Image (spheres, rainbow, N blue to C red):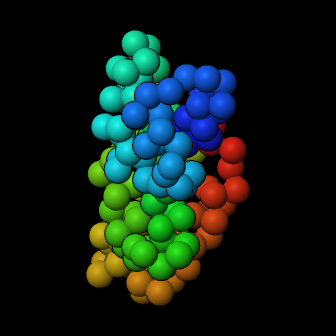
Amino acid sequence: MVDRAVNALVAGLDTSGLRDLAGRVSDENWFETHDLIEETFSELGAPLPQIDTDASILVALQFMCQQFASGQVSARELAKWAHAHVGHEGPALAQDLVELDDAFDEIPYIDGDEAEWTERTKVAAGAFLQLDVL
């Protein structure tokens, strides 16, 4: 959205929301800019685009996988998030990560340890990050 705001300014559109949005970093968290994006569309008199729910889920999961890869969240936290926000009925591309939460829950009852499931999470998150989710 930041790049699109810059392009809109270059094309001659100008609102305070566009200027604010164009000044943001391009990888800024969607959840932190959502209100500004809505305000900008309103200033322009344009309807907010409809967002495909599955695509939104996959983009959010991609963000969470990046957080995991950079050490911001643990394997357990990533799996728990995927289970809670994607769920077993969510997009098929995300099911490996969703199912890891069930595996973490079973650690006390199966022959395995958390390090093994953390490694499996690294593999699943790495594979997911390689996908073209959009």
Q: Quadrant of residue 33?
A: top left
Report if residue 18 is visible in the image: yes
Q: Quadrant of residue 129?
A: bottom right
Q: Where is residue 71 in the image (x, y as percent from the top left)?
A: 47, 79
Residue at 40 percent across and 12 percent down: it is 45
Residue at 61 percent across and 56 percent down: it is 128
Q: 99 or 131, which is in the foreground?
A: 131
The quadrant of the image that shows the N terminus is top right
Residue 22 in the image: above or below residue 102: above
Q: Where is residue 112 in the image (x, y as percent from the top left)?
A: 44, 83
Q: Position of residue 24 (x, y in %)?
A: 49, 51
Residue at 57 percent across and 51 percent down: it is 26
Residue at 55 percent across and 35 percent down: it is 5
Residue 44 in the image: above or below residue 40: above
Report if residue 117 is visible in the image: no
Total marks shown come to: 0
Q: Is residue 87 left or right of residue 18?
A: left
Q: Position of residue 35 (x, y in %)?
A: 31, 37
Q: 127 or 9, which is in the foreground?
A: 9
The quadrant of the image that shows the C terminus is top right
Q: 31 or 96, which is in the foreground?
A: 31
Residue 74 in the image: above or below residue 131: below
